[in-house]
Image: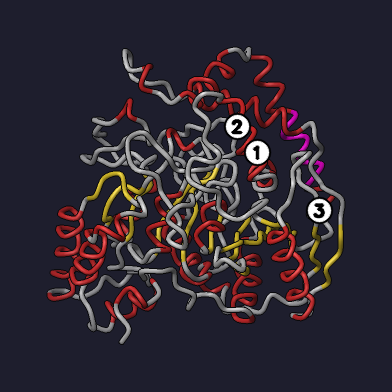
Amino acid sequence: MSQLHDLTALEQGDAVRNGDVSPLELVEHYADRAADPVRAGVGAFITTTHDLAREHARRLSDLLAGSGRPADAGPLWGVPTGIKDLHPTAGVRTTFGSAAYDDFVPEESDALVLSVEAAGMPSLGKTNTPEFGSPCYTEPDVAPPAVTPWDSTRTAGGSSGGAAAAVAAGLLPVAPGSDGGGSIRIPASCCGLVGLKPSRGRISGAPRYGDPVGLATAGTLARTVRDAAALLDVLAGRRVGDPFWAPAPSAPFLDACDREPGRLRVARFIAPVIADVDVDASSVTAWEDASRLLEQLGHDVEDVAVPIPPEAVADFETCWAVLTALSPAPPGREDQLRPLTRWLSARGHAVTGPEFGLAIGRLRQHAAGALAALAPYDVVLTPTLARPPALVGELRDDADPARDFAHQKAFTPWTSAWNVTGMPAVSLPLHVTDHGLPVGVMLAARPAEEELLLSLSAQVEAAAPWADRRPPGW
């Protein structure tokens, strides 16, 4: 017999709307699952907020019993979620994945948290993330590592590893993440999920606007394309003061999933953007199978040269180091930062203002060149990762942070390209290795064309569905 967590997020929203289940019943169901010691072992949360979620759900349930569901309620109204621990949440411990902030409680919530609350989605907790969201694995000193529920010895990826582990293990129906170099798509690939990084400016970074380069954005992690689109509808939108924004969609993003994409021109490449990287056979197979599937769906698939030049890597690293340096520890707690963070921060502090400005300018030139080269194509296909999920601790090297950083680059040689260009990109869980590990493939579209990307992704999912694949212990 199916249980509540077997339903998609949208199906749970339908059940609330039809009166088959209450928001409080959904919260209690997921709180019970999260309390199970085995399921808790995936390392999904840094801080749980079950009592706050119950309070929120009771208010929603009281509304249903009284005046009824609000007229402007979206399809995910009453559906629980979680908040990545990089987002300040009023009155809730927010660690930014760092032991240096293990007792920090913000007084105000950021725009993403407010959007989730306004959409009627109770939060069950702060999902696990590495320190300041920097590494592509989630092994913070403030919490146990986040692991993929497909193999508890392997990483859930990062930096949205906790959110991905929670959704993949059935501890949350859907969850927001954030992505500055692949931090949604990497854990989506590791955990067998849909991971959508939207266009630059699609989701507001208010009020902190902590990324002056424009690499990072919030996004969505879900089991299905439709769930990912529905959560994007919750998060998307311009706020007064945003330094850049994407134009409003023609209709809700969820509607795009019900439209045929038409015959598309698909560019593909598999050569890593980062040189001298070995690509595992599973990633090659996933990419080749996806190419054939797109052709079978009537699309034209063409090989293209890598659109980002090798010299862009150094400029990205310069900007990444400076961004890390912009997240200092509280005074007197610097020794609690991880070696990788201290190493990157030192690199960032060594960059002069003019050097930083020139690196940003060159990144934008690289982006412009890539966008011009890809302009004739509707979407671009690459692998998501160079290999299946790494073992916990395999990428991390506290004794040699430079080696740690090199390991991360070799694991993720494509994802950051679309942060540089600002293009929307999605990882789809199309492949599974002989050992049962998920392997994603990545599609990217022109800036602000999430609707097309979602339409194509929904078409791909319909042709090769994955939602019924469940990890052990589901």
Task: Give amino acid for label 2.
Answer: Phe
* Disc 3 to disc 2, C-alpha distance: 29 Å
What percent of the width, then of the height, locates residue 99? 33, 29
Which element carries disc 3, helix, strand or loop? helix
Secondary structure under badge 1?
A: helix
Asked if the stretch drawn in magenta spans residue 366, the answer is yes
Residue range (magenta):
362-370
**Crowd around label 3: few <14 · some 14–19 · many ≥20 (10 Å):** many
Residue under label 3, please give it: 374
Of callouts 3 and 2, the N-terminal one: 3
Q: Residue 460 bears which disc, if any?
A: none
Residue type (three-letter) at the residue carrying disc 1: Lys
Place residue 431 in its image quadrant.
bottom right
Mark 3 and mark 1: Cα distance apart in space: 23 Å
Q: Mark 1 points at which residue?
A: 409
Q: Is residue 327 above or below residue 136?
A: above
Q: Nearer the viewer, mark 3 or mark 1?
A: 1
Q: Where is residue 425 in the image (x, y as percent from the top left)?
A: 63, 56
Kindly check if marks 2 and 1 are in contact, taking CB atoms under 8 A apart as contact.
Answer: yes
The one of 157 and 295 positioned closer to us in this rendering:
157
Instruction: Pinpoint residue 371: horizontal percent, then vertical percent.
Output: 78, 48
Among the two numbered marks 3 and 1 on one chain, the one whose residue lies closer to the N terminus:
3
Q: Name the residue under label 2.
A: 405
